[in-house]
Amino acid sequence: MTIGRRSRNGLNGVLHVLTTAIGETLAPAFGGTDQADVGEACDLAEAQNVPDALLPEPLQQRNPLGIWRLRDGQFVKP
């Protein structure tokens, strides 16, 4: 399982995630991870949609520090 820039390998079997609305099992299952790993992945996915007003200034879209960004798999500098 890849979380951000890290890859997690483990021996914990398979972890299935359920939808909160109807309790249906989502596919694919996550092999070799634990609940904390899945929680971290969910937190990162949710953070991708944070409005600029809630982010620190260097992370906002206008990017005042000119930080390189990963966009569509390519590093770009504003």
Image (cartoon, rainbow, N blue to C red):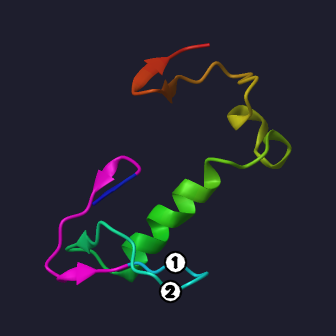
Tag 2 residue = 23
Q: Magenta stretch? A: 4-16
The number of numbered badges drawn on the structure is 2
| Residue at point 72%, 49% (across, down) | 50
Tell whether label 1 touches label 2 (CB within 8 Å).
Answer: yes
Q: How far apart are marks 2 and 1 (CA)?
A: 5 Å
Q: Main secondary structure of the magenta part?
A: loop
Q: Residue 7 lies in magenta, yes or no? A: yes
Viewer-closest of 28 and 53: 28
| Residue at point 74%, 22% (across, down) | 64
| Residue at point 59%, 24% (across, down) | 67
Mark 1 falls on what kind of element?
A: loop
Q: Residue 31, image x and y in percent?
A: 21, 72
Q: Residue 41, image x and y in percent?
A: 45, 63
Q: Callout 1, which amino acid?
A: Thr
Q: Which quarter of the figure is the C terminus placed in? A: top right
Tag 1 residue = 19
